[in-house]
Image: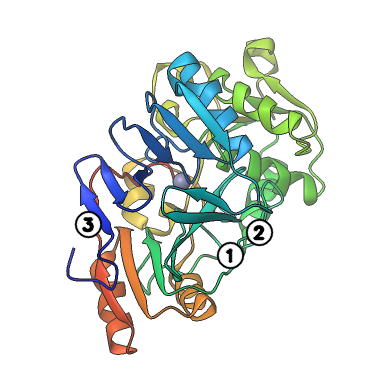
């Protein structure tokens, strides 16, 4: 990390550390106190002593990790300012997945906003991103290149509905990430009037049930194991991306394989994964959304992490923002 405005933020082996607060943000190794932006596994790891996050994130971590999710937790609420040692922390929605939040950390009047993963596109499965004025903004850059310009989500989902109608004898097998993408794609299908039962691979049911319990309406969903082989034709089945080409998927004989991800913009990935029906559906901000967000939060300084740091840093520096890359380790793009 180059010299930044903030000398009270340190990069340690465990992750990003706030000195006057004595806590880490999304640490990659267990720590005493962790602030967690959201429950994706590259941000929320087990075995921290104490975690501070939204109610949904804490419950999702419990669901995924069992008793190792933490020893002690504190639920963050939107209407509260929490004092942690010498800083004050407020949370704001990040619009990424259910429970995803940003942290606004105030130390002696200086405001640091840590966005975690975020997007600006409306998503019925979570609260919309809230821009907050700050002095230093830490942004992700998963899709931080000008070539990333996510298409309209409804147009992408219409492609799936059209394909189902055109291939009535086939099973549509769609790869989706278990937390967030799966449920967002279901709600988009429901909004467009698709009201048939959607079948899920066993690895997707627990989190989808959690969304349902949190009043995200998913309609009729069912575990595909409850369906006999003779009934597979004309069914819509979601599975984790890793299952698209494994042994499990071989039981479906006449299939259209799809994959819902922001990475489907890249032709090479579509080919590599042998995808006939790529659906470009991202839960991260694209290039335009990142720039819009930087303008909205209007910081003196932008620190860039997770992905294409250099291009964004170069662009923002040209636009007279003080900007540098955080270069954190341990973050993956496969959750997209
Ligand atoms: Zn994420």
Label placed on residue 327: 3
Q: Nearer the viewer, residue 58 or 329?
A: 58
Circles 3 and 2: CB distance less than 8 Å? no
Quadrant location, the N terminus: bottom left
Label placed on residue 128: 2
Q: Secondary structure at mark 3?
A: loop
For image coordinates 25% across by 60% down, the residue present is 326
Q: Nearer the viewer, residue 223 or 319?
A: 319
Q: Check the image and report above or below for 226 versus 20.
A: above
Q: Check the image and report above or below for 249 versus 109.
A: above
Q: Nearer the viewer, residue 303 or 179?
A: 303
Mark 1 sits on what residue? 120
- Determine which quarter of the picture holds residue 195: top right
- Determine which quarter of the picture holds residue 173: top right
Q: Earlier in the sequence, mark 2 or mark 1?
A: 1
Q: Residues within 10 Å of mark 2 (few under 14, many from 20)?
A: many
Q: Residues within 10 Å of mark 1 (few under 14, many from 20)?
A: many
Circles 2 and 1: CB distance less than 8 Å? yes
Residues under labels 3 and 2: Cα distance? 27 Å
- Determine which quarter of the picture holds residue 255: top right
For image coordinates 32% across by 67% down, the residue present is 303
Q: Earlier in the sequence, mark 1 or mark 3?
A: 1
Residues under labels 1 and 3: Cα distance? 24 Å
Q: Nearer the viewer, residue 104 or 313?
A: 104
Image coordinates of residue 315 in percent, x first then y, are 30, 81
Image coordinates of residue 220 in percent, x first then y, are 79, 28
């Amino acid at each position: 990390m180059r010299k930044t405005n903030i000398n009270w933020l340190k990069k340690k082996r465990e992750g990003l550390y706030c000195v006057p607060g004595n806590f880490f943000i999304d640490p990659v190794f267990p720590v005493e106190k962790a602030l967690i932006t959201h429950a994706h596994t590259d941000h929320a790891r087990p075995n921290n002593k104490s975690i501070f996050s939204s109610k949904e994130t804490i419950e999702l971590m419990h669901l995924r990790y069992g008793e190792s999710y933490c020893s002690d937790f504190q639920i963050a609420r939107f209407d509260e300012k929490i004092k942690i040692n010498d800083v004050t922390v407020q949370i704001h929605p990040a619009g990424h997945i259910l429970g995803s939040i940003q942290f606004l950390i105030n130390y002696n009047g200086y405001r640091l906003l840590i966005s975690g993963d975020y997007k600006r596109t409306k998503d019925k499965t979570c609260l919309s991103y809230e821009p907050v004025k700050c002095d230093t903004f830490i942004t992700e850059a998963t899709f931080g290149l000008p070539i990333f310009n996510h298409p309209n989500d409804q147009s992408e989902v219409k492609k799936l509905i059209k394909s189902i109608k055109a291939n009535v004898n086939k099973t549509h097998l769609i790869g989706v990430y278990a937390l967030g993408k799966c449920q967002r794609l279901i709600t988009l299908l429901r909004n467009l009037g698709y009201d048939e039962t959607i079948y899920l691979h066993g690895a997707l049911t627990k989190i989808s049930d959690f969304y349902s319990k949190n009043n995200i309406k998913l309609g009729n969903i069912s575990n595909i194991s409850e369906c006999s082989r003779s009934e597979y034709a004309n069914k819509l089945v979601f599975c984790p991306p890793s299952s698209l080409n494994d042994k499990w998927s071989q039981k479906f004989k006449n299939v259209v394989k799809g994959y819902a991800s922001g990475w489907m913009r890249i032709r090479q990935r579509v080919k590599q994964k042998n995808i006939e029906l790529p659906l470009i559906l991202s839960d991260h901000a694209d290039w335009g959304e990142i720039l819009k967000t930087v303008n909205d939060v209007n910081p003196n300084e932008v620190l860039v992490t997770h992905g294409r740091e250099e291009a964004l840093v170069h662009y923002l520096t040209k636009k007279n923002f003080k900007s540098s890359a955080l270069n954190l380790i341990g973050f993956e793009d496969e959750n997209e």
